[in-house]
Image (spheres, grey):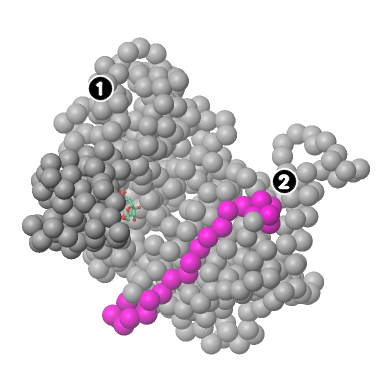
Amino acid sequence: MSWQSYNQSLVRYPQHGFSLDLSLMDIAPGLVASLQPKIDKAFTDMAALEAGQIVNPDEGRMVGHYWLRNAALAPNEEVRRSITEPLENLKRFAEKVHTGAVSSPTGGNFQQVLLIGIGGSALGPQLVTEAIGQNARLALHFFDNTDPAGMDTVIARLSHTGLDKTLVLVISKSGGTAETRNGMLEAKAAYEAAGLDFGRHAVAVTGTGSKLDQYAAQQNFIARFPMEDWVGGRTSVLSTVGLVPAALQGLDIDALLAGAAAMDVETRKTEAAKNASMQLAIAWYSATNGKGEKDMVVLPYKDSLVLFSKYLQQLVMESLGKELDLDGNPVNQGIAVYGNKGSTDQHAYVQQLRDGVNNFFATFIEVRKGRSGNSIEVDPGTTTADYLQGFLRGTRKALHESGRKSLTISIPEVTPFQLGLLIALFERTVSFYASLVNINAYHQPGVEAGKKAAGAFIDTLNKVRGHITSWAKTAGEIATEIDADPEDVYHCLTHLSANGEVQISIGATPADDSFQI
Ligand SMILES: O=P(O)(O)OC[C@H]1O[C@](O)(CO)[C@@H](O)[C@@H]1O
C-alpha cells in the first residue's frame, strides 16, 4: 500500500466529489495491456448499444436504459418521445396527487403508497426510498413477494392511516409476473373487504398491452404508465418504474437523472484510465480472473445505502450470471455479490473476510459527510462520523494486511444526484464487464426454469387436492394415482397439512406418513 499507488490509481471527478480508489486491488501491471483489444471492443460495443443496435440478440431487443437520462441520445424520435412524454406525465400526475386534484374516492388526499412489484420492479424503488426518501411526502410500503403473512403485515401497517388513503402502484414490465399478480389480487381483496373500489386507488406501470395493462384498463385504474421493452427490469430504476414512485414521494427526480447523466458523460470517454466504469470492470476482471472466481462484498458505510448491496446483487448477478457466452460456448459466468453495511458488518462476517477463506474482494462505499447539523463529541474532540470513517479506513487496511483486495468509492453525501452517479457507474460497469467476458448481460434465461418448475408444482398440488380422501393415503399412493413424483406429492401434502387442508399421521419415514381429510 503506498501513497504513490493511491495517487496513480485514483479515478476522480472533482466536479462531482466522486472518486474511485483501486490502489488495493493489486491489478497486475501487464493486465490492462493484455486486455486492450477487449477494452477497445467494450467501448465499441457500448457505442453500438447507445446507438440503438440490437445488443440483446436472444430477445431481439435494443438496450436503452442510458437514454432515460438523456433522451436526446435516443436513436429516433419515437423512442425519444417514449421517454420524455411519460416523464412529463408522471411529474404532472405526482403533482395532482400532492395537491389533491387526484384524491381518494372517499375524500381527502392520498397519504401513502403501496408499491406491488418484484425484482427490478421493486428493488430500484426500495433503494431510492431507503437512500433519499427520508422526508418523502408520501410514505412508500411494499409487497415484493408472494408471502401472504408478509402482505398481512403490510396491510395492517397501512390500515393505521387507512386503505382509503393509500394509493396502490402495481409495477410489472411483463405484466404477467405471478408474485406481483398475486400481490395485486390480495390487495384488491383487502380493499374490497374494506368496502373500497380497488381500481379507483390503483395505478399501473407496465408494458403497453400487457396482461396488467389490460386488467388496469378493465378495472378503471386511475392511471397507467408505460414501460418500454428496451429497458430491463434490473436497469429500470430511472424509467417509469423508479420515477413514478420517486415523484410520488416528492423526490428530486431531475437531480437523480442528472447524476446518472453526469456519470454517463464521464464513462462514455474512451480513455480507459480516466473512465471509472471501465476501471471498475478491469478491477472485477483482475480480481475474478474474468471468471467470477472471487465474490464481491459490498460495504457501504452509510445506513441509507444499506439496500445498495441488495440492488447490486440483482444488477450484477442477473446480468452476468450466464451459462453461455455470445458465441454459444458454455462459460458459466457471473460474480456473486453480497453485503450489507459498515461498520455493522464488522461485528458479523468481517471476521471471516479478515481471517477466513480469501474468496472475495471488497467494495467499500465511503460517504464523506456524517450528517447535516452539529455533532456531539462521543470522546474528547471525536464524533460518531469520525468513528464511521475510522472504521472504514481501518477495515480496509486490516483486510489489505491479510492479503484481501478491496476498492473504495467515495462520494460527498447521499443526495439524489450522487445516487444517480452511483447507479450509472455500476450499470455501465456491468455493460463493460459483459463485453470483456463476451456475454449477453441483458437477458435472464435461467429465471424461466424456476418459474416453469413452480408452475408444474402448482399443477401437481391441485391434482393432489383432488385425490385426498377421508381415508388415509401415503404420498406414494397418491403419486401412483396421479402419475407424479412421490417426493413432489409429499411436499404438496405437507404444505396442505401446514395450511389446515389435510391431517398428517407421522410414520417412521416420510414414505410412511399418511394423509387424510
Ligand atoms: O417487471 P416484471 O416483468 O414483473 O419482472 C420482475 C422481475 O422478474 C425478472 O424478470 C426475473 O424473473 C426480473 O428480471 C425482473 O426485474
Precedes in sequence: disc 2 or disc 1: 1
Residue under label 2: 369
> Which label belongs to residue 437?
none
344 falls in the magenta region: yes
Q: Residues within 10 Å of mark 1 (few under 14, many from 20)?
A: few
- Which residue sits furthest front? 508
Expressed as whole percent of the image width and height from the top left, the position of residue 125 reads 44, 43
Q: Quadrant of the N terminus?
A: bottom right
- Which residue sits furthest left? 481
Judged by depth in the image, the label closer to the viewer, 2 or 1, is 1
Please, is residue 22 above or below residue 182 in the view?
Answer: below
* Most foreground residue, 277 or 283: 283
> Which label belongs to residue 192?
1
* Most foreground residue, 222 or 304: 304
Q: Quadrant of the C terminus?
A: top left
Q: Secondary structure at mark 2?
A: loop
The answer, for residue 111, to whether it is visible in the render is yes
Q: Which residues are magenta?
A: 324-347
465 falls in the magenta region: no
Q: Secondary structure at mark 1?
A: helix
Residue displayed at 47% across by 69% down: 335
What type of secondary structure mainly makes up the magenta span? loop
Q: Residues within 10 Å of mark 2 (few under 14, many from 20)?
A: some
* C-alpha separation, residue under disc 2 versus residue under disc 1: 47 Å
